Image (cartoon, coloured by chain):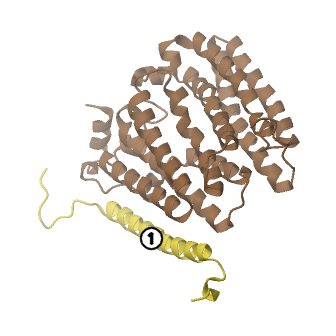
Amino acid sequence: MSIAMNESPFSPRDLARRRRRSIALALILAGLVILFFVTTIVRLGGDVALRSM
Amino acid sequence: MSDIQSSLARSGSASIGDQGAVADYVALLKPRVMSLVIFTALAGLIAAPARMHPWLAAVALLAIAVGAGAAGALNMWYDADIDAKMRRTALRPVPRGVILPGEALGFGLTLAMGSVLVLSLLVNWVAGALLAFTIFFYIVIYTMWLKRWTPQNIVIGGAAGAFPPMIGWAAATGSVDLGSIALFLIIFMWTPPHFWALALFREGDYAKAGIPMLPVVSGPGETRRQIVLYSLVLVPATFLPALLGTAGWLYAAGAAGLGAVFIWHAIEVYRNRHGAIADRAAKKLFGFSILYLFLIFALIIAERAIGVAPFGPVLG
């Protein structure tokens, strides 16, 4: 079976699935950013700004 | 035409990849196994003699859960050929053709590396190293080597499923101690009777896929004998947390009652050897074994939640 150059090999259903996967991936990446940020704050501790320079 | 090829043909354009829905990727993570992993890791974390910041504890559990999911995805990548031959596993995303083996491999490796890095960098290196070893053990030692080679596959391979409480404990303490080894031993001794009960009523599936499970290689009679023997070792092992000063009277009383029921189910499997009644006994043991492990670890969590003091250590 050959696929013409201007013809997508993906059906509308495939494209919808890809879009949902992309959204899930974006949410996971945003979650990771929050995870690393909050963990950094937690590990630094509450008095980090009060240390002697 | 193989089962996989025919499912690819049925699904039309699956060979080009990029077809899986989000739910298919979630299925690759074996969510039911993952939930038991999270629960036992939480018990290890709570039983450990060190307190953790709740956020860091949540990060540790998340990393352990993702690591377990990664191991599940890598297992489905490697075992796609035998999964396609068994009723229980034929509808998994890779044999169904909605996720290509290479996609499952990439997904699993990415999650494995990510979870180990997160646990190592954000919690501690001991927990991270244990998680990395667990994933390695499950994929290389169990899935690639033991599973297709020896009827002792789930005896030795069961160690992979036994590590999560040890990882949880290490996340809290930064070390491996006798208390965490006791939790490891409980799951390690529980795994053979649990899986052999399943193998007794799924023997045909395993034989068709060429997996040398004990009932296939040594017969159902020997499997029943081994189930009883392992159950008789498992139940005393569940008292180790109390003897090592990790658990108290509530846990000990619960472990005694649950242990008596477990051994009774194992003896029923041994006694009932033919026909539907034999299958029913094996199914009952399999079902109870899941509840049993859940309740044993729930007792550890409950004791800490309601403030039951652990016994003083008799051993160690």
Question: Which one is nearer the viewer's eye here, B76 or A32?
Answer: A32
Disc 1 on helix, strand or loop?
helix
Name the residue rendered at 38%, 52% in the picture: B109
Question: Which one is nearer the viewer's eye here, B33 or B117?
Answer: B117
In the image, taking residue B156 as reference, residue B9 lies left or right, namely: left
Name the residue rendered at 43%, 56% in the picture: B111
Vertical side of B275 occupied by B152: above or below: below
- Dot 1: few (<14), some (14–19), or many (≥20) neighbours within 10 Å? few
* Image quarter (top left, top right, bottom left or bottom right) of the N terminus of chain B: top left
Image position, residue B65 (x, y; %): 55, 53
Disc 1 residue type (three-letter): Leu
Question: Which one is nearer the viewer's eye here, B129 or A36?
Answer: B129
In which image quadrant can residue B91 be found?
A: top left
The colour chain B appears in is: brown
Name the residue rendered at 36%, 49% in the picture: B104
Residue receiving disc 1: A29
